[in-house]
Amino acid sequence: MIEFQHVFKSYRRGRNILADINFRVSAGEFVFVSGPSGAGKSTLLKLIGGLEPASRGSIQVNGQRLDKLPARARPYLRRAVGVILQDTHLLFDRSAFENVMLPLAVQGQPWDSAAARARAALDKVGLSGKEDLNPIELSGGEQQRLAIARAIVNRPAILIADEPTANLDHDNAQRIMNVFRDFNRVGVTTLIASHDQDLMARYATRTLRIDPGKFADSAGTAPPPDAGQAPPAAARTGGGRAEPGFGHPGESA
C-alpha cells in the first residue's frame, strides 16, 4: 500500500514541484503516472522509493510512514521497493551478471540460489547470453533492461519505474511491459511514469496525472492485468502463480 496525505515537495525554498498531493494505491494495483516534463513525475517516484524526503505531509509505503522510519529500517524498505530510474546507476566496473547479483549479495543470499535468480532475471528482460559483458558494452536500451533485471531480482513487493521503455524499440518495450504485467499478476504493486500515450492506452487501468498546479486521479481504459486470473490478493497469500526463477513477491529465498 502507498498513501500520500497533503504531500509537498520543493527544493531550496523554490516553488513547489509537488503541492498538496493526496492519493492511495492499494496492494496489487497497476498505476501509470503521467504529465509533462518537469511536472514532478520522477520526484513522486523518488518520494515513494524513499530516495528523497517530502518537504511537508505524510507518505506511507508498505504500512511504514517514511518520515518516521528509523535508519536501521531503511534497508528493508529498499528491499521491498524495486526502483528503476532514468539514470540507471549501473556499476561499470562489474559485469552485467554482477550488477544483477549485487542486491542479493548485500542480503547474504547463498551463491547458487542467487546466481540462478540473477540469470532468470537477465533472461526475463532478454539479456541471456550477455551476462559477462560490462554495462559500457551494452546499448542504452540494454542498459535500461539491465537496470530492470536488477530491480526485479529482489522480488520486491512494489515496483516503480521512471520511463522504463524510453530507450527501447517497440518489441523490447512490449517485452518489458509484459514483465511488469507478469509481476503485477502475482501481486506486485506497480507504478510507471511515462509520456507514452499509446502505452497508457494499452496498459493503464488507473492514471495519476500531474500538471503544474494540478493533480488528477482517473481510471484508465485498459483491462485489469489480472483479468480472467486469480486476483492479486490470492497471489500475495500464496494462491497465485510465481514467475519461474523468482517466486512470490517479498520472498527472500
Image (tube, grey):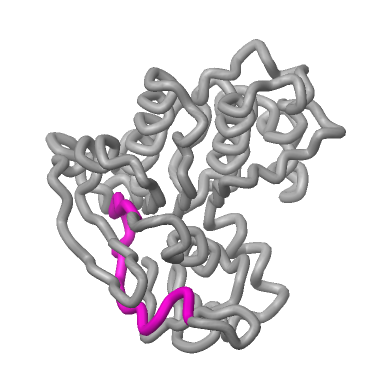
Name which quarter of the figure residue 62 lies in: bottom left
Is 143 situated left or right of 196 in this image? right
Residue 90, how many percent across, how many down? Answer: 72, 39
Query: Image quadrant of residue 222?
Result: top left
Q: Is residue 244 visible?
A: yes
* Image vertical order of residue 111 relative to residue 63, above or below: above
Give me the residue at 15% from left, 38% from top: 227
Where in the figure is residue 232, as x and y percent of width and height?
27, 48
Q: Residue at x 59, y 19 (%)?
A: 127
Find the magenta span and give its range.
16-33
- Outermost residue toward the top in this view: 129
Q: Main secondary structure of the magenta part?
A: strand
Q: Give the quarter of the figure containing the N terminus.
A: bottom left
For the C terminus, the image quarter is top right
Q: Is residue 142 above or below residue 225?
A: above
Residue 26 on the magenta segment: yes
Q: Kindly tell me whether residue 117 is visible in this rendering.
A: no
Q: Position of residue 201 (x, y in %)?
A: 20, 40
Q: Is residue 171 left or right of residue 225?
A: right
Instruction: Using the image as rendered, state which of residue 60 and residue 253 is in the foreground.
Output: 60
Q: Is residue 23 magenta?
A: yes
